[in-house]
Structure formats: C-alpha cells, structure tokens
Amino acid sequence: MKHLIFHTAGESHGPQLTGFLQGLPAGLSIDFERIDAALAERQKGFGRGGRMKIEHDRCQVTSGVRHGVTLGSPIAFVIENRDWENWRSVMSVQAEKPAPASDRERQMSAPRTVPRPGHADLAGALKYDFEDLRNVLERASARETAARVAAGAVAGVFLSQFGVETACHVVRIGGAVAPDKALTVAEIRMATADSDVRCADPAAAVAMHDEIRAAAAAGDTLGGIVEVVASGVVAGLGDHIQWDTKLDGRLAQALMSVPSVKAVEIGDGFGQAARRGSTVHDEIHYDFARTQTGSRFYRKTNRAGGLEGGLTNGMDIVVRAAAKPISTLNKPLASVDIHTKEAQSAFVERSDVCSVPAAAVVCEAMVLLVLADAYLGAFGGGAMNDVLERFHAYAARLDRFGR
C-alpha cells in the first residue's frame, strides 16, 4: 500500500508540467528555495542541449499549502514550459488546430512518422493507435522529470525531519570512470559542488568532458552510471514479508522508471555475483560503548548498500543506476516510416549529447519519494507532530533492543 501518492501530467512542449502529491501530514514547513534549487540542479550539466537555455524552471505550488505549511490535503504544483510560446499551434489542446504562426511552426506541425530506435515512439504508437509519433514522444520526453524533481525536493524536506540526507553523483560517462570508493553524503556534496558533470573525482571529470566532446563531434550520444547515497535512514523500513513491500524492490522500480535507465544495483550489486559469500556479506558487530555509530549494532562494510532482506539495516543506502545513451542522435539510426513502411533515417528532435548529470538529480528525487513513502508507512499520521512522536517511540524501542 502506497502512503505517498505522486503523479505528473503534461507534455514536453505543452504549457506546463503539473504535479500532484498526496499523503504528507499537516504541519510540515515547505522550503520553496530547496525546490527551485533542485530544479536548477537538474538543468545543469556539460552536454545538455539548447532546451536548457530556454527553460528557467520554477515551481508554483497551487494547493495543499497555506502560509508555507502543509495542510494535509493534496499538494498540487505547476512548472511552466517557456518553450510553449514556440509550440502553441503544434501543441494546442483546442479541437480546431490554430494556423502556424511561422514557417518553423509549420515545419514542426508536420506529423512525425519515423520512430527513433531506443525511444517509446513506435511501441507507443502501436499501443495507442497513433498516426503521429508526437503524441507519444511529447509525454515520453525526459522533460517530465522536472516534476519528479520538484516532488522529490518536497519529500526531502519531510525526510530531513528524521535526519535523513541524500546526495547524488556521476561515477561513469561513456568510457570515463571515477575510482570506486565509498563516499558519504557530505563528501559527495562538497566534491561535486562545482562539477558540471557532477563527478566527485576531478581527473575522471576531465575524462568525462573529453568523452562528451568526442561524442558530440561524431553526432552521437553517451550514457553512464549515477549513484545516490542516503544517510540517517532508520533500520527496519520496508518488509521481508511480501514481494511488493521489500524496499530494495521498490527503489529499483522507481529508478528503472527514470528515462534511459536500463539497470539498477544496490550496494555492490552486480559485482557480488562473481565473488564468494565470505567476501560479500557485511559482518555484524556489537559496540557496548556505542562509539562506532548511533546504534550498538554496526558493520565495518556496506556491500549490501544498506538493505538486507528487503529492509533497511541502519547503514547508508547506496544505489546505482545505469543510463543508456539518449535515443535522439544528430547522425540518426536506420528506421522505417510507419505510413509508407519504407526505410528511412530516424527523425532528429532537439536533444542532449549527455544527460547523465541530470539523471543523477532525477534518481535522487525518486529515492527521496520512495523513502518518504516508507517513513509515512511506518510512522504516518495526520499531523507532523504525530508522525514525529511515533518515530521517536520507534527509535527508543530500537535503543532498548540494543540495551
């Protein structure tokens, strides 16, 4: 059962994106600057396309908040698409299509009939019986993720009440790979603050720039791997009882929903498949003086990524997502016109060369939303004070368990 309901609406070149967030308790002070700061982070990154020069994302909350504090009712918000001004006739919702205002609009109004390999174009047209692929690509566009980032920032405000903090960084773009080492949330934030590829290793960041430049010169695109770390997460979130209550499964599903993401690992993930159990599992220790961590039970390693048996174990949550290269190439791949069935090159829509740094921000937002839902499921109530009271009672019980 989901306790935090989140939906988005809107097309890439429509007038706005709309978000809907239900389930947060009353009495939570909303940090609007945090929301807009997260949206700004999503727009950054070396290798982004021209769209980011047009948009200047800001979130306008339209319901569920009064005088900066949640009411317990559904929170709705909108993010304006500035590029809408250039697409009014193309994306009009009216039954009678307005006449194009320019030759450019007339060109954009032409039906898209040649699908891009790797995109939702063809499969979406088959499912919904569309003659124009724009009916698919406008919603399948990663532009929708701006609404996810805004909602994730609200979830982050909620989680901060429990001491939960998160950070994201890029560990690979193309063939450029950052050294594999565990980093704390604070270390990631400090190391990536001035990196336009959101990489914590300066040498790897230089190599990532070179990879992106080379791909751009070749008319190609690049993918990569991002990592999200969450600290301060209480032990026991999630469940081992049913398949759909396991928190690792829910995190994986949320990350797989991010455009271009094709693989997810938690902790050492894929690497563990090649090793013996004696080198994989995190041994459990007990600290009578509680000098190692806040809990007397602790582990010296975190190969499990903070999750065991579908539950959090009190260690940092560490998840990675692998994003494939963007489907729109300036030197397009072979395809077929859905009307004539003739071979053609896929159409070229304005796009990025590499959006991996932005994908990291989106993945962090999805982790925040899943964790917020897990906290609400464990400690939920109508008012923030009630939620905190239940959380502190649970934390006290864990402390008594450790004695």
Image (cartoon, rainbow, N blue to C red):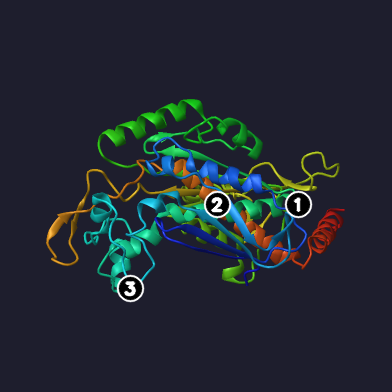
Residue at image location 81% in from the left, 44% down from the top: 287
Amino acid carrying mark 1 in the image: Gln
Residue corresponding to mark 2: 149
Residue 316 sits above or below residue 379 on the image: above
Task: Determine the image quadrant of residue 119.
Answer: bottom left
Q: Could you tell me how far apart the alpha carbons at marks 1 and 3 are, in whole angstroms?
A: 43 Å
Task: Give the position of the N terminus as an image quadrant.
Answer: bottom right
Q: Is residue 262 left or right of residue 316?
A: left
Position of residue 163 relative to residue 127, above or below, is above
- Mark 1 and mark 2 in contact (Cβ < 8 Å)? no
CA gap between label 2 and label 1 equals: 19 Å
Residue at left 39%, top 67%? 93
Q: Residue at x 87, y 53 (%)?
A: 403
Q: Secondary structure at mark 3?
A: helix
Mark sitting earlier along the chain (2/1): 2
The numbered disc on residue 161 is 1
Label 3 crowd (10 A; few <14 / some 14-19 / many >=20): few
Task: Kindly identify the amino acid type of the residue bearing the numbered disc 3.
Answer: Tyr
Q: Nearer the viewer, residue 185 or 131?
A: 131
Q: Secondary structure at mark 2?
A: helix
Q: Which of marks 2 and 3 precedes in the sequence?
A: 3
Camera-nearest residue between 161 and 63: 63
Q: Nearer the viewer, mark 1 or mark 3?
A: 3
Q: Mark on residue 228?
A: none
Pick the front one: 209 or 393: 209
Crowding near the residue tagged with mark 1, few <14, some 14–19, many ≥20 C-alpha atoms within 10 Å: few
Location of residue 372 in the rendering, given as x and y in whole percent from the top left corner: 66, 58
- Image quarter of residue 155: bottom right
Measured as percent of width and height from the top left, residue 63 is found at 65, 63
**Separation of marks 3 and 2 at Cα, in angstroms:** 28 Å
Instruction: Please give the label number shown on residue 128.
Output: 3
